[in-house]
Image (cartoon, rainbow, N blue to C red):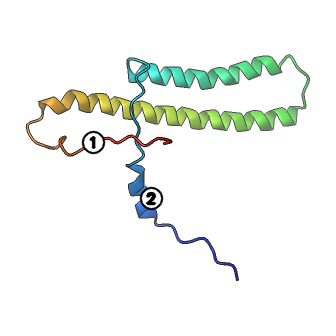
Amino acid sequence: MPAGRPPLNLNQKIRDILTHTCGVDTSDDSPIDNFELRANSSLNLIRYLDNRIQRQSFYQAVYDRHMGLLRLRVLGSLIENFERFIKETAIVCVDLVAPHTFDDRFDKFSVKSIKGF
């Protein structure tokens, strides 16, 4: 009998999520600018394809299937972009609040960038 996949330690996987951090993209001035740029690029892809494909002949079932999958991916991208917006906003807030704290709660925390995440 073939050996199955080794069991996953889900508690450790959840803890590992905290190490998946990367630096803030400095190409824009504010988190909302980053969010608008990324969200609009995803939505513009859908608009572009809708406009280009309407001029062509196609099978409706194939079109519906592929556009449905593309819309799911765009939705996932929008969710990731919103999550990044929340994180970038939190970074800005911590940077503004940290100098005004009298205790050492922000001294121990440091964000480490991991390439690829």
Q: Secondary structure at mark 1?
A: loop
Circle nearer the viewer, 2 or 1: 1
Residue bearing the label numbered 1: 110
Residue 95 horizontal/vertical position (percent): 24, 29
Residue bearing the label numbered 2: 13
Q: What residue do we see at 46% from left, 41% from top?
A: 115
Closer-to-camera residue (109/62): 109
Binning the other alpha carbons within 10 Å of mark 1 as few (below 14), some (14 to 19) or many (20 upward) gives: few
Labelled disc at residue 15: none
- Can you name the residue that lies furthest to the front here? 115
Q: Is residue 52 left or right of residue 113?
A: right
Question: Looking at the picture, which amino acid does disc 1 mark?
Answer: Ser
Q: CA distance from mark 2 to mark 1?
A: 20 Å
Displayed quadrant of residue 21: top left
Binning the other alpha carbons within 10 Å of mark 2 as few (below 14), some (14 to 19) or many (20 upward) gives: few
From what the image shows, is residue 115 above or below residue 53? below
Residue 38 horizontal/vertical position (percent): 53, 25
Q: What residue do we see at 17% from left, 42% from top?
A: 107
Badge count:
2
Q: What residue do we see at 86% from left, 16% from top?
A: 55
Q: Secondary structure at mark 2?
A: helix
- Can you name the residue that lies furthest to the bottom here? 1
Instruction: Specify the quadrant that holds the N terminus.
Output: bottom right
